Amino acid sequence: MKFGALAAALVIAFGAQAPQRLPLDSLPAELSASAPFGLPAEIPVPLDNPFSAAKLALGRKLFFDPILSLDRSIACASCHQPEHGFAEPARLSSGVGGALTQRNAPSLFNRAFGERQMWDGKGASLEQQALLPIENELEMALPLDVALERLRADAQYSELFATAFKDGVTRDNLARALATFVRRLTFGDSPIDRFRTGEVAMITQQERTGMWLWESRAGCWKCHSGPNFTDEDFHATGIGVQSGEPEPGRAAITADAGDRGKFKTPTLRGLTLTAPYMHDGSLATLEEVVDFYARGGNPNSALDSRLAPFEATLEERAALVAFLKALSRSGPPPQAR
């Protein structure tokens, strides 16, 4: 979707308003510089975007501000809501004018540790990803040159950018500020992390059974590996298949037919906050997710060879769900509270 100079000028001049869907900044005043227990202690930062408190403050303000959407009706936080694990409790998000996004809003937890961003890996870095929703016609729908004009015309933002960057308001600096904020959105220190280091009383017997299934017969570890419970790779699970044909998925980015139907493995941390699940939001509960994988995904020509049906009783499936929920909890097991 292209916006003419006249339309852009009208938006700048009159600041068109629409019904608001703007979560408040309910985060702690200080966002930790180190990752929580269970994750690598140091949050990685690229050489061309070193951390500064001024960048963090600027990125945080921008994240919650509707100034970056065409009609000033939504902000980054509208689809990445803090109380929902920086995801949204809807299958698809509503962009400017009520347009529906093509994919479920993914959680932003621990994206500092990600190798590529977005469900199809279109974002090679957090800096690149940060700008894509702004211009996307189904999301914030604001041309970046108009966004930059708005920010330069705003006295407070002009000052904040000048404090954070020598060259003030630029496309790259907008991306750097937003990415700096997102890198501080971490989630960890679950009972599972504590159990793995010897604090065996931290999880229930049911959660232990679920972890054993996850590590053995269910084979979840094949893709959900490492401290963030994701291999940061792309797999075709059959979600989104229609009449036996998978979506383009990762292939739309790489032009490699072998990537057809593949989407990024999400982290398992914070799952109780981030329903619904999968890249299209088609599975409403963790129970549905477990059932989906127990049957081996949806059959199609691109189905990942790692997926295979596994036998699990109702009790075992409930144990897997309990294990997944434990990754969203902190403190002692429920019966010990």
Image (cartoon, rainbow, N blue to C red):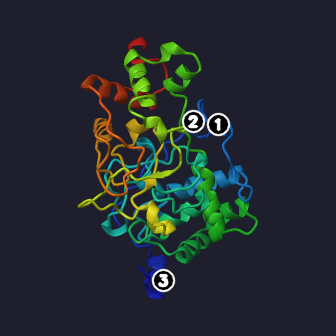
Of labels 1 and 3, the one closer to you = 1
Relative placement, left or right, of 288 versus 302 is left
Residue 156: give x, y in percent of width and height.
Answer: 62, 63
| Relative depth, front residue between 158 and 77 | 77
Tell me which residue sits at (31%, 24%) in the image: 316
Give the labeled residue for mark 3: 9
**In the image: residue 203, left or right of residue 19:** right
Amino acid on which the number 3 mark rests in the picture: Ala
Q: Position of residue 324 (x, y in %)?
A: 40, 31
Q: Earlier in the sequence, mark 2 or mark 3?
A: 3
Report which residue position mark 1 lands on. Answer: 40
Amino acid type at circle 2 is: Pro
- Mark 2 vs 1: CB contact within 8 A: yes
Mark sitting earlier along the chain (2/1): 1
Local crowd size for mark 3, using a 10 Å CA cut-off: few (<14), some (14–19), many (≥20): some
Q: Which residue is mark 2?
A: 227
Number of dots carrying numbers: 3
Q: Quadrant of the N terminus?
A: bottom left
Q: Badges 1 and 3: C-beta atoms under 8 Å apart? A: no
Q: Position of residue 323 (x, y in %)?
A: 41, 27
Is residue 117 shown above or below 223?
below
Q: Residue at x 43, y 36 (%)?
A: 220
Could you tell me which secondary element the residue under label 2 belongs to?
loop
Q: Are marks 2 and 3 in contact (CB under 8 Å)?
A: no
In the picture, measured across the screen, residue 9 lies left or right of residue 241, that is: right
Q: Label 1 sits on what residue type?
A: Pro
- Residue 269 visible in the displayed image: no
Image coordinates for residue 67, horizontal then vertical, percent: 49, 65
138 versus 305 height, above or below:
below
Separation (CA) of disc 1 from disc 3: 46 Å
Name the foreground residue: 190 vs 19: 190
